[in-house]
Image: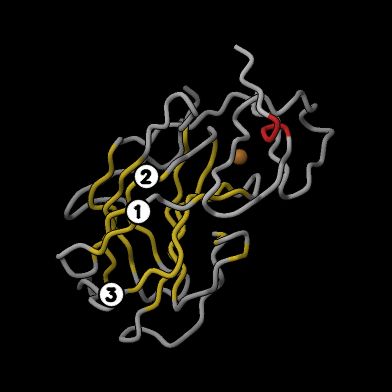
Amino acid sequence: MMKRRGMLGIAIVVSGAVLCGCQADAGDTDAGSAKPDAAMPAAPDETVHCEGKPTLTTGVTSGSKALGAEGLINARLVDANPLPPTISTPSMPNPADWTVEFTDAKGEPVTDVELSAVCAYMPAHGHSGPPKKITAMDEPGRFKLDGLRFTMAGDWEVQFALTSPSISDSTAEAPNCKASGRPAAAGNELVIFRVCIPDL
Ligand SMILES: [Cu+2]
């Protein structure tokens, strides 16, 4: 049962390739009194309830939607497996595979989208991790993300920093994704899906 490894007790937001290990034995911080710094995961022993929060849906016409920060690009969840997404642990990685479509205000696919950063980000704790693989699909505006991991129960965001010369030359807010330990650069748009991951 003792699976403690040296690194697990230390809260460091390291390179984007290293996923948060904070679901394992982060100590017994008193909820309420402790004020962890941004990089320090809180104690994971509070039960997470996702009831009443928006449910992630997929579909050609109705899937979950997200609006870009500049309001110029919409994203739609075309497919997700598993659905709903589940917590990812070392023994049960449960990688999430998502297909996302980016469209303009009229609902037409944006054909020149380039993704500059994608990650699953946990705002409460400030950690993030990229998908294992991103593939541009044959259908215009669609991308497949393989191996997204939600390493703790709680509220997560899946953030996309993207550029699309045909839509915008503006600069959106930077994503919270990190690449090689550094914040990722902002694109023309920042699109965010919000998802609650329940306890096992
Ligand atoms: Cu966390």
**In the displayed structure, does residue 16 sit left or right of residue 126?**
left
**In the displayed structure, does residue 109 sit left or right of residue 154?**
left
Question: Contact, CB < 8 Å: mark 1 with mark 3?
Answer: no
Q: How is the image coloured?
A: secondary structure
Check disc 2 and report its element: helix, strand or loop.
Answer: strand
Tell me the distance, in whole angstroms, between the alpha carbons under discs 1 and 2. 7 Å
Viewer-nearest residue: 53 or 192:
192
Quadrant including the N terminus: top right
Mark 3 vs 2, N-terminal side? 3
Mark 1 vs 3, N-terminal side? 3
Check disc 1 and report its element: helix, strand or loop.
Answer: strand
**x, y (%) of residue 32?**
79, 32
Q: Which residue is mark 2?
A: 147
Tell me: is circle 3 under 8 Å from ligand 1. Answer: no
Query: Which residue is drawn at the image coordinates 47% and 70% (left, top)?
Result: 69
In the rendered view, tell whether residue 157 sits above or below residue 47: below
Q: Which residue is mark 3?
A: 104
In what quadrant does ligand 1 lie?
A: top right
Question: Contact, CB < 8 Å: mark 1 with mark 2?
Answer: yes
Q: What's under tag 3, amino acid-wise?
A: Asp
**x, y (%) of residue 80?**
28, 44
**In the displayed structure, does residue 184 sit left or right of residue 187?**
right
Q: How many marks?
A: 3
Mark drawn on residue 133: 1
Q: Quadrant of residue 46?
A: top right
